[in-house]
């Protein structure tokens, strides 16, 4: 009887139609994987940190006396701690200095400016605006990261692992906090994606915005120029070969305007310096003010020799766990640099190396946050996770530590 029913023309055509529809939907989903998979990584990781944040805030007592970002919205206040107050202050009141004291001129303008614009457009408070900006920028950053990883590795499965590793990295809660991490990630990854696809104007515009988000964003100029040299046939391994230089000279004659376009990238930094010059008569004030945070520049190697032995101290202090994680993040980034060089090229490796060495000239205290925008590191990790056991180990370890560090952060214990 069943065979007779299936043999009927109407049933057969309906079965074929359903099968054809399923194949079409599967093909559409595969074509849209560059959007759907980053959205999935975003949704799952944000569900984790939001749930853990609420639970951690409910069941653990927070020391009184801390700044409360949104008194009428306890959930928003969870994601505006520590340096968030500076961005909120800039968005509300603008820049000002207090002689001999910490000042908001140490923080670059694009993120708080975006907060202010969004707040005015939506008629909401700047704290909520910052929360929206951070999360939407993080989603955009994951989308660009997926496309860049697929381009560099030639493997969409590895690209999927890349975005999941970043979304669940132990300090990835900063991507939803009122911090610049998500905006900086979006702009730097987009810059490099457009450079790799030879869209130099878009790369320059994104790089310029990155240099207005953080001072180290100006390094995108060097990274994009390095990619332009590669596009012209120049390689570091052939720097002494006349043929390579002749090829580059011919490329420059045909595309002489492209280096000028790429030179737009430092404009974001230069505009902020011009603003500081006009308003405070000190264009390098964002550097000078660092001394009020007791940041003594003693060099990265001296810092490593000073801070690494502290993880072996017998007395366990409140900051011990986060210090261990910051040291681990530093060693991980430095240790992976040769592998980044081998897998992705010398430009990416030098970028990661500089972005680690510059912040640790005085302390390792925030490295666990600074590694978040180091996208080449996560691309290489995505390539390493081919084996299911390795993939599951990395992702589960990251997720557990993400929950733990989120709980610590929402309870006003300094993480990074």
Image (cartoon, rainbow, N blue to C red):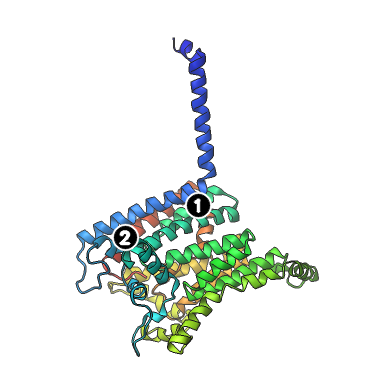
Q: Which residue is mark 2?
A: 404
Locate the N terminus by quadrant.
Answer: top left
| Quadrant housing residue 219 | bottom right
| Quadrant housing residue 75 | bottom left
How many other residues sit within 10 Å of disc 1, few (<14), some (14-19) or many (≥20)? many
Q: Position of residue 358 (x, y in %)?
A: 49, 77
In front here: 18 or 52?
Answer: 18
Q: Position of residue 401 (x, y in %)?
A: 35, 59
Q: Position of residue 315 (x, y in %)?
A: 28, 74
Tell me the CA gap for discs 2 and 1. Answer: 23 Å
Give the residue displayed 34% in from the left and 52% down from the top. Answer: 47
Q: Which residue is mark 1?
A: 385
Query: Vertically, is 12 above or below 251?
Result: above
Q: Position of residue 89 (x, y in %)?
A: 33, 75
Using the rendered image of the protein, determine whether residue 404 is visible from the camera's viewpoint.
Answer: yes
**Of callouts 2 and 1, the N-terminal one:** 1
């Amino acid at each position: 009887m069943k065979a007779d029913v299936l043999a009927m023309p109407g049933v057969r055509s309906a079965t074929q139609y359903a099968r054809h529809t399923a194949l079409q939907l599967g093909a559409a989903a595969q074509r849209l994987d560059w959007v759907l998979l980053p959205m999935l990584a975003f949704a799952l990781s944000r569900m984790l940190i939001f749930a853990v944040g609420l639970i951690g805030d409910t069941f653990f007592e927070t020391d009184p006396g801390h700044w409360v970002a949104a008194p009428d919205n306890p959930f928003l206040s969870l994601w505006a701690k520590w340096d968030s107050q500076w961005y909120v202050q800039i968005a509300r009141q603008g820049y000002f200095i207090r002689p001999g004291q910490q000042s908001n001129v140490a923080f670059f303008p694009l993120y708080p400016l975006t907060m202010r614009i969004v707040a005015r457009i939506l008629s909401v408070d700047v704290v909520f605006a910052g929360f929206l900006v951070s999360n939407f920028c993080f989603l955009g950053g994951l989308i660009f990261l997926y496309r860049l990883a697929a381009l560099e590795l030639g493997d969409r499965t590895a690209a999927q692992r890349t975005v999941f590793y970043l979304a669940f990295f132990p300090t990835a809660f900063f991507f939803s906090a009122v911090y610049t991490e998500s905006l900086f990630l979006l702009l730097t990854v987009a810059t490099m994606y457009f450079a790799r696809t030879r869209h130099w104007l878009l790369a320059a515009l994104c790089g310029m915005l990155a240099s207005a988000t953080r001072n180290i964003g100006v390094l995108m100029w060097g990274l994009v120029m390095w990619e332009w040299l590669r596009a012209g046939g120049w390689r570091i391994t052939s720097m002494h070969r006349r043929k390579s230089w002749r090829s580059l000279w011919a490329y420059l004659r045909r595309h002489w305007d492209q280096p000028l376009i790429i030179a737009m990238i430092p404009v974001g930094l230069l505009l902020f310096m011009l603003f500081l010059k006009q308003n405070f008569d000190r264009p390098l004030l964002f550097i000078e003010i660092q001394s009020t945070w007791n940041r003594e520049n003693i060099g990265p190697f001296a810092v490593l020799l000073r801070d690494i032995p502290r993880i072996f101290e017998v007395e366990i202090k409140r900051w011990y766990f986060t210090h261990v994680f910051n040291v681990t993040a530093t060693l991980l980034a430095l240790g992976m640099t040769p592998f980044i060089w081998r897998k992705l090229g010398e430009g990416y490796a030098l970028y990661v190396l500089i972005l680690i060495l510059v912040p640790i000239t005085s302390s390792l205290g925030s490295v666990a946050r600074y590694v978040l925008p180091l996208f080449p590191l996560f691309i290489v990790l995505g390539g390493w996770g081919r084996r299911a056991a390795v993939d599951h180990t990395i992702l589960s370890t990251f997720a557990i530590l993400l929950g733990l560090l989120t709980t610590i952060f929402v309870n006003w214990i300094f993480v990074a």
